[in-house]
Image (cartoon, coloured by chain):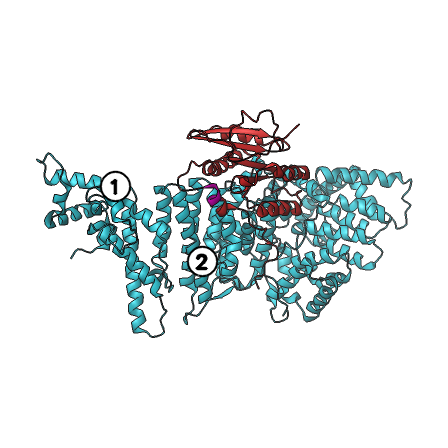
């Protein structure tokens, strides 16, 4: 079956509408997040969920233009990271001008190897994408994560005057991991 | 159990002294003796007492295999240990039995694992066990197990003076590669100024060259350096990885369980040898789960009287007023649990004025550990209960920092780490408050440590986070400036930023950091206002920041003037609410006062600082724009900051476009103009704003505006 490459500008935008695609291989956090995202009243927010990319061809016609693609990575699972990494190549390069962001959960978990967090940081930095951290265990954390995604989504969907996705991503993109353990203070 | 189990109760010496007593008291004593006999008889039937007796009397070389009696007794002890804990006497007996290897290594490990104290661990038992270490028969793993046990129960050992007396003996084990990390930790807890000797420093340095820069060696050396800087010339990184690992010892959970179960019992027991009255839930550092230990003293009353007068120490817990504190300043015994200092204002006062850095070092060590292990990487991802504990803990930490008016270096190191994984909402008020307390960050580091994570958070978060961060950065600036004005030395060249840490900064270094901060906030503010559509709440927080910036010279004596960027100035000038315009006018007025006084000082004293012409140019530019725009109705005049083509302006069809932002037509003040017009000419039907422009009504109108509380405008253009 032929798979489609997701393109940012192949379709027309809807009036006062923003569309977000949440990609998570484990499908744990995305539903929770989607429920909170659609509660937004100022604009119509459509949330599409996917386990991984590419998206199937069959819904191609009915699928709206996607304004922001969010990769949710659970740091406790290596698979989650690998899956997101593999999905990236099914995005049109145009998306990397501010319409992709990474959201990481469980970053404070003691069992997470630091190398994995570093790898995610490196990935996000090399693609010039923002890297957001989320506390998915608490209701406050979920609300806050949804709020932050909406902030980016509104800009990416062109709903904020005088701001574009590229402009915002220039301010928020991930920078290379700081090595705080060995600072050269002396 | 503790009172019942008293094997060596009223000793012979007590009884013999009774013989001298008078006859009248003899009968009382006899009845006491009868009671004592009765009690002993009861005890003799207690299987646990018999078990202990077995372990204290068993002979070396007794076979282990098939020894049912041993098995039965040990099971008995283990059961009691895990349910109620062991009394001090039982600990002594069992430890002695284990370390002497009377029945080999296997029971030794088993016994060590069940040594859960109910109340305290007698110091003598530990010292004896340490001596057994030196005999050299004990396998290395068992030795490590024993040291780990001592570290775990360290705060429960009833006194430390004898342990300190064998400091040198304990130190000798440092050469053993396997024991070294644990011995270093134990030494760290025992070290005092007098324990630091040249040969010990040399030994540690020698070890370091052999083992590499191990964190445990560095930590011990850093403590030595604090006590005797002249002996340790090694440069020690000011920020170290947490040095001593968290040993997931087998006693941890058992000890918590036993102590929780005994909580009430311990509190009600008054026969304890040391002050424990408030200590309803005695936990130790490693199990604190972010709970502050209660300030308690481990200096045994008896031990205290034994001490020679020259080394007499007073535990902090026995002091109740500042006067007492001052009288005993030179001989204060710090509590074993440094975290308890955070809860006591007297202890904080002591920390604040005492010169030796070891207290602060130990507190930082404890704090860094607690913040990092128990909060930052809490393991389970943070249930609601842990966050409640974290909230109280951080609040306590904050109030201590406010009391001391400076932050702890460990909380600073923690913040940098936490910011890089923060979601922007978890414990936001506490984290932002902690952040606003951090001392001046060198300008070479400030971008990487602070600005990068904060910028990402700022631009992806809600308006309220943006406002919160602005407030935090304002407070940070105010604190930095206050430190500068307090700690700046007379010669105005060098400032020591923090009385406790040895960060010294040159004035230019400090200026660079402040300038970096102001420029960073300028960038955040400009773009933030743009993204949020010049929201007046955000604008208000931004103007708060510039109210501090405009007064750096006069209020804080820092020779630095930084103007706001156009992205802040123009949104404030054209803001829809009059308060913002008024505050901008006030800020411009303060800039003027600061710049004028800087200029006059520059003329008077030759070597005064130099303010760049660019700053004056920027100020004058803003001043011209403001006066022309608000007072002179000359908006869009050539040479002003905002320029638009003549044709374009005509095309807009706005009549008299040059007046559109004067104090009458400015959208923020229009309603006042209407109100004034109605009051001035009540009869008039049609509104003619131009009539306010005439000189008499104009001065009345300004008076009217000033009377509405717009003092900023009044100060900005003083009435002639």
Q: At which x and y percent is residue B287?
A: 64, 44
Which residue is nearer to you in this view: B261 or B221? Answer: B221
Q: Is residue B124 visible?
A: yes
Q: Residue at position x 66%, y 27% from top?
A: A1
Q: Which residue is mark 2?
A: B516
Please identify the quadrant where the N terminus of chain B is shown. top right
* 2 vs 1, front mark: 1
Magenta region, residue range? A164-168
Which residue is nearer to you in this view: B75 or B600? Answer: B600
| Secondary structure predominantly adopted by residues drawn in magenta | helix
Q: Which chain is mark 1 on?
A: B
Q: Tell me which chain appears cyan.
A: B
Q: At which x and y percent is residue B218?
A: 66, 61
Which residue is nearer to you in this view: B321 or B562? Answer: B562
Residue B636 image label: none
Q: Which residue is mark 1?
A: B652
Q: Is residue B380 above or below residue B563?
A: above
The local secondary structure at tag 2 comes to helix
Q: Residue at position x 31%, y 59% from top?
A: B619
The local secondary structure at tag 1 comes to loop
Q: Earlier in the sequence, mark 2 or mark 1?
A: 2
**Is residue B271 rendered magenta in the image?**
no
Q: Is residue B493 left or right of residue B151?
A: left
Q: Is residue B710 left or right of residue A127?
A: left
Q: Tell me which chain appears red.
A: A
Rounded to the nearest angstrom, the CA distance separating label 2 from label 1 is: 41 Å
């Amino acid at each position: 079956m032929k798979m489609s490459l997701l393109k940012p500008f192949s379709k027309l935008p809807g009036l006062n509408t923003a569309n977000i695609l949440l990609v998570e291989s484990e499908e744990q956090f995305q539903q929770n997040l989607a429920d909170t995202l659609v509660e937004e009243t100022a604009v119509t927010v459509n949330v599409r969920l996917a386990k991984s990319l590419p998206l199937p061809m069959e819904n191609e016609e009915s699928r709206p233009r996607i304004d922001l693609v969010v990769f949710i990575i659970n740091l406790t699972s290596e698979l989650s990271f690998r899956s997101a990494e593999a999905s990236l190549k099914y995005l049109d390069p145009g998306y990397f001008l501010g319409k992709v962001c990474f959201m990481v959960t469980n970053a404070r978990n003691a069992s997470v190897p630091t190398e994995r967090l570093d790898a995610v940081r490196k990935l996000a930095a090399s693609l010039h994408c923002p890297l957001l951290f989320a506390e998915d265990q608490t209701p406050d954390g979920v609300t806050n994560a949804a709020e932050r995604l909406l902030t980016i989504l509104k800009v990416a969907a062109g709903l904020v005057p005088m701001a574009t996705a590229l402009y915002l991503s220039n301010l928020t993109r991930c920078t290379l991991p700081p090595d705080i353990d060995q600072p050269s203070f002396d | 159990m503790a009172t019942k189990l008293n094997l060596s109760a009223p000793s012979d010496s007590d009884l013999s002294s009774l013989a001298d007593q008078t006859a009248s008291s003899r009968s009382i004593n006899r009845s006491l003796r009868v009671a004592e006999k009765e009690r002993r008889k009861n005890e003799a039937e207690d299987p646990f007492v018999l078990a202990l007796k077995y372990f204290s009397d068993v002979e070396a070389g007794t076979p282990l295999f098939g020894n049912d009696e041993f098995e039965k007794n040990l099971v008995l002890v283990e059961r009691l240990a895990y349910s109620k804990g062991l009394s001090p006497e039982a600990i002594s007996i069992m430890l002695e039995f284990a370390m002497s290897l009377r029945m080999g290594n296997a029971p030794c490990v088993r016994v060590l694992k069940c040594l859960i104290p109910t109340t305290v661990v007698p110091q003598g038992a530990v010292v004896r066990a340490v001596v057994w270490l030196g005999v050299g028969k004990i396998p290395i793993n068992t030795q490590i197990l024993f040291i780990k046990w001592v570290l775990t129960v360290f705060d429960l050992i009833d006194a430390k003076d004898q342990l300190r007396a064998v400091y040198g003996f304990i130190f000798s084990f440092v050469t053993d590669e396997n024991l070294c990390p644990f011995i270093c930790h134990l030494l760290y807890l025992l070290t005092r100024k007098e324990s630091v000797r040249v040969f010990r420093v040399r030994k540690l340095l020698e070890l370091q060259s052999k083992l590499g820069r191990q964190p445990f060696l560095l930590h011990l050396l850093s403590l030595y350096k604090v006590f005797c800087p002249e002996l340790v010339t090694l440069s020690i990184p000011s920020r170290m990885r947490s040095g001593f690992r968290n040993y997931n010892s087998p006693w941890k959970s058992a000890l918590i369980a036993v102590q929780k179960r005994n909580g009430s019992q311990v509190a009600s027991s008054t026969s304890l040898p040391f002050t424990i009255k408030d200590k309803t839930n005695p936990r130790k550092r490693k199990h604190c789960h972010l709970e502050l230990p209660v300030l308690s003293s481990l200096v045994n009353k008896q031990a205290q009287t034994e001490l020679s007068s020259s080394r007499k120490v007073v535990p902090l817990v026995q002091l109740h007023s500042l006067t007492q504190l001052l009288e005993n300043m030179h001989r204060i015994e710090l509590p074993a649990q440094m975290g308890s200092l955070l809860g006591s204002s007297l202890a904080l006062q002591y920390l604040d004025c005492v010169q030796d850095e070891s207290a602060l070092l130990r507190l930082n060590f404890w704090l860094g550990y607690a913040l990092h292990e128990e909060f930052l990487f809490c393991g389970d991802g943070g249930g609601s209960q842990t966050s409640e504990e974290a909230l109280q803990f951080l609040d306590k930490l904050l109030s201590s920092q406010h009391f001391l008016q400076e932050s702890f270096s460990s909380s600073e190191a923690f913040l940098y780490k936490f910011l890089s994984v923060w979601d922007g909402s978890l414990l936001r008020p506490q984290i932002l408050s902690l952040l606003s307390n951090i001392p001046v960050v060198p300008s070479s580091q400030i971008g990487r440590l602070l600005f990068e994570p904060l910028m990402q958070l700022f631009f992806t978060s809600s308006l309220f986070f943006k406002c919160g961060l602005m407030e935090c950065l304002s407070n940070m600036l105010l604190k930095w400036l206050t430190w500068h004005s307090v700690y700046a030395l007379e010669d105005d060249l060098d400032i020591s930023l923090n009385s406790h840490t040895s960060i010294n900064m040159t004035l230019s270094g400090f200026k660079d950091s402040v300038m970096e901060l102001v420029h960073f906030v300028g960038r955040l503010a400009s773009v933030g206002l743009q993204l949020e559509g010049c929201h007046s709440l955000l604008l208000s927080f931004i103007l708060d920041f510039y109210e501090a910036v405009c007064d750096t010279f006069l209020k804080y004596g820092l020779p630095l003037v930084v103007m706001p960027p156009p992205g802040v100035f123009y949104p404030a000038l054209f803001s829809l609410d009059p308060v913002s315009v008024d505050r901008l006018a006030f800020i411009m007025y303060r800039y003027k006062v600061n710049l004028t006084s800087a200029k006059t000082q520059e003329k008077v004293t030759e070597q005064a600082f130099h303010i760049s012409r660019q700053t004056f140019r920027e100020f004058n530019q803003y001043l011209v724009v403001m006066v022309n725009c608000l007072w002179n109705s000359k908006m869009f005049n050539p040479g002003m900051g905002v320029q638009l083509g003549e044709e374009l302006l005509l095309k807009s069809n706005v009549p008299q476009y040059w007046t559109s932002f004067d104090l009458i037509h400015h959208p923020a003040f229009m309603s006042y103009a209407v109100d004034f017009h109605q009051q001035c000419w009540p009869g008039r039907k049609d509104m003619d704003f131009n009539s306010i422009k005439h000189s008499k009504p104009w001065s009345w109108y300004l008076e009217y505006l000033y009377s509405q509380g717009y003092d900023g405008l009044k100060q900005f253009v003083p009435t002639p």
